[in-house]
Image (spheres, rainbow, N blue to C red):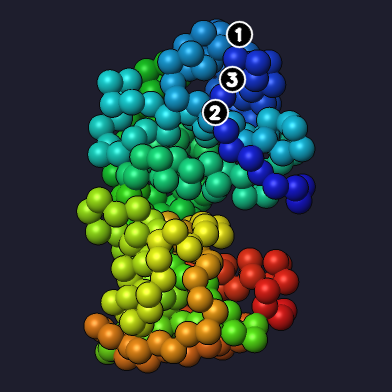
Amino acid sequence: MSSETIIRRYRTADQDAVTDLWSRASRQAHPFIEGEGEGERARVLREEHLVRAENWVAEREGRVVGLLGLLDGHRRHSAGSGTQIGGLLVAPEAQGCGIGRQLVEHAAALRGALCVEVFEENERAHRFYRSLGFMQWSYRTDEETGHPLIALEREAPLRSVSWLHLREGRLLSVRTRGNDTFYLPGGKYEPGETAREALSRELSEELGLLVPAEQLSEAFVIHDVAHGKNGRRLHMTCFTGGPQDIAPEPGREIAEYAWFDRQEARDRCAPAHSQVVDRLIAQGKMPG
């Protein structure tokens, strides 16, 4: 499946599609649980989880192909520090397309720190969550099924903003003093700032550029591992806009700036650059 994924709030009209998805995906994930995906467990889904949880669906080509349920602190069985993912399921025919990852990052963008419980026998789920930076922190037996559950958690992602400035198909990047790696211009938010305000300030501090916040347009969001942060995840909002003819003047901690082509960016820049470059190539803004 190659079409765009839309993540939106669950609606009552989605109940039949979501129940069918949940039944098929849960039977596939939990073949060791008798009656999974049917009977009483299906009733609980319809009458409790879909009513009381904060539910989101992933949709492709008009079809619901993923379900994310978030539980508030009063309904959690586990004691993790973050919002609990009460359910994350992807239709069997849509698995392997990144939908589960998109749903998890959507949850992180909404709530920050996350926790989740998975059955010990569900090794695929363990691998999936570990690949997204979740760490195991507790273990218990599920009272309803008698099967062991492993709890995992992930701290809130680092939230940052960056500027996409291209010159003849090459991407502007900056290097801080004492560091060999290049990053996109930008940085972290300060209290009370919007994303555009944060980026406008960072461009002034880093490169002496006056780029009014209202001239910035959101391009896309990148989710990756934050460079040099011990595996912590990164939520980076990328913007375009502002002047095209610029004469940067490195300030604050910036040692130098440069415009890189595809290969240079991948060789010399932080991991998130690769995703940015791939997006820009797909949009025809950088040569492949």
Residue placed under numbered mark 3 in the picture: 11
- Name above or below for residue 260 compared with residue 75: below
In x, y percent, where is residue 223? 48, 58
- The reply to whether callout 2 and callout 1 are in contact (CB within 8 Å) is no
Q: Amino acid at mark 2?
A: Arg
Cα–Cα gap, marks 1 and 3: 22 Å
- Name above or below for residue 263 compared with residue 158: below
Cα–Cα gap, marks 3 and 2: 6 Å
Residue placed under numbered mark 2 in the picture: 9
- Disc on the earlier residue, 2 or 1: 2
The foreground one among 30 and 14 is 14
- Disc on the earlier residue, 1 or 3: 3
Q: Amino acid at mark 1?
A: Gly
Residue placed under numbered mark 1 in the picture: 39
The foreground one among 234 and 32 is 234
> Which residue lies at the image location 42% right of the left edge and 29% below the top edge?
70
Cα–Cα gap, marks 2 and 1: 26 Å
Is residue 173 found left or right of 192 in the rendered image?
right
Residue 286 position by quadrant: bottom right
In x, y percent, where is residue 170? 60, 84
Secondary element under disc 3, as helix, strand or loop, is: loop
> Which residue lies at the image location 44% right of the left edge and 68% below the top edge?
162
In x, y percent, where is residue 101? 54, 48
Q: Residues within 10 Å of mark 2 (few under 14, many from 20)?
A: few
Q: Residues within 10 Å of mark 1 (few under 14, many from 20)?
A: few
Secondary element under disc 1, as helix, strand or loop, is: helix
The foreground one among 148 and 29 is 29
